[in-house]
Amino acid sequence: MPYADLDTGRIFYEEIGAGEPIIFLHNAFSRGIIAFSAQMSAFQTQYRCIFPDLRGHGRTISDNLNWTIPQLADDIIELMNAIEIKKAHIIGYSMGGGVALYAAAKYPERISSLVTIGAASCVTEGIKSNADNCELHILKNEEDKRFIELLKKNHYDAHDGDWRAFVKTSVNNWRKYPDLASEELGRIACPSMFISGANDNSIKEEHILKLAETVPNSISRVIEGCGHGPHLIGEKPEVMNKIILEFLNGTKK
């Protein structure tokens, strides 16, 4: 199993394919290969695909569970250094999209292109509502026993069984990040595409339009008939794969 040793711990990642590197950044409570299972086959024939488990998630091991989304962006650059990648395409979903935005804004010279799915530059009302519901139904009342068991199973290595600390840290991040000013977003130098599902209650069209208006050399796409994860199995992964691959291939011209 591949691990990279960072200052913050040991980050676990999967790697398949060959070509220019793409780093896929998963959403909260997920893992790299879970969040992008519908992309693995389509992308590996053209790109070197890297699926890390972000700090606090999956098999990544760290002594400190008090991570923040900006710190996760630093982790990704450290991972790139550790596995000798000078520059990479980044695809981030939901929380991973926030991580991707921070990485592209802080380290523009390291990012070849940027794609976010279901992400905004600020904390939206929908995300705040998700945080409130998670705190009430999961942390306080433990109503969803199946979800809690999945947290324990999928992320045991990352939080050593302390699923409460994991959820609390995640919720705190949802309420605070992303918090990117226009000046920061203006530093993103790579071709960028911001995607949302038309039926997404957390990230709406107005949020990705704002991103596209602020980030140079960027476009936005709304996927009809989809919710928060249009790339996921059960939504429109084939459509999404085609859109993203065409965008990535266009950056090579």
Image (cartoon, rainbow, N blue to C red):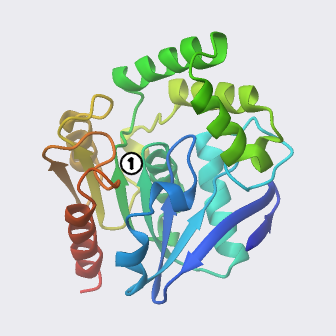
Q: Nearer the viewer, residue 224 or 96?
A: 224
Q: Residue at x 81, y 37 (%)?
A: 161
Check disc 1 and report its element: helix, strand or loop.
helix
Residue at 45 percent of width and 65 percent of height: 90
Please state the horizontal and vertical placement of residue 193, each as a whole percent of the image: 27, 59
- Residue 18 drawn at (x, y percent): 49, 89
In the picture, the quarter occupied by the C terminus is bottom left
**Badge 1 amino acid:** Leu
What residue do we see at 33% from left, 30% from top? 202
Describe residue 112's horizontal placement relative to residue 237 as left or right: right
Q: Is any part of residue 56 visible from this angle? A: no
Outermost residue to the front: 146
Left or right placement of residue 51 versus residue 97 in this view:
right
Where's residue 150, x and y in %? 63, 39
Report the label total: 1
Q: Quadrant of the image for the N terminus?
A: bottom right
**Residue at x-position 58% and y-position 77%:** 15
Please give the residue where the numbered disc 1 appears in the rendered image.
185
Residue 123 coordinates in the image, percent (x, y) = 42, 28
Count residues near mark 1 (Cα–Cα under 10 Å), then give few for <14, some for 14-19, many for 20+. Answer: many
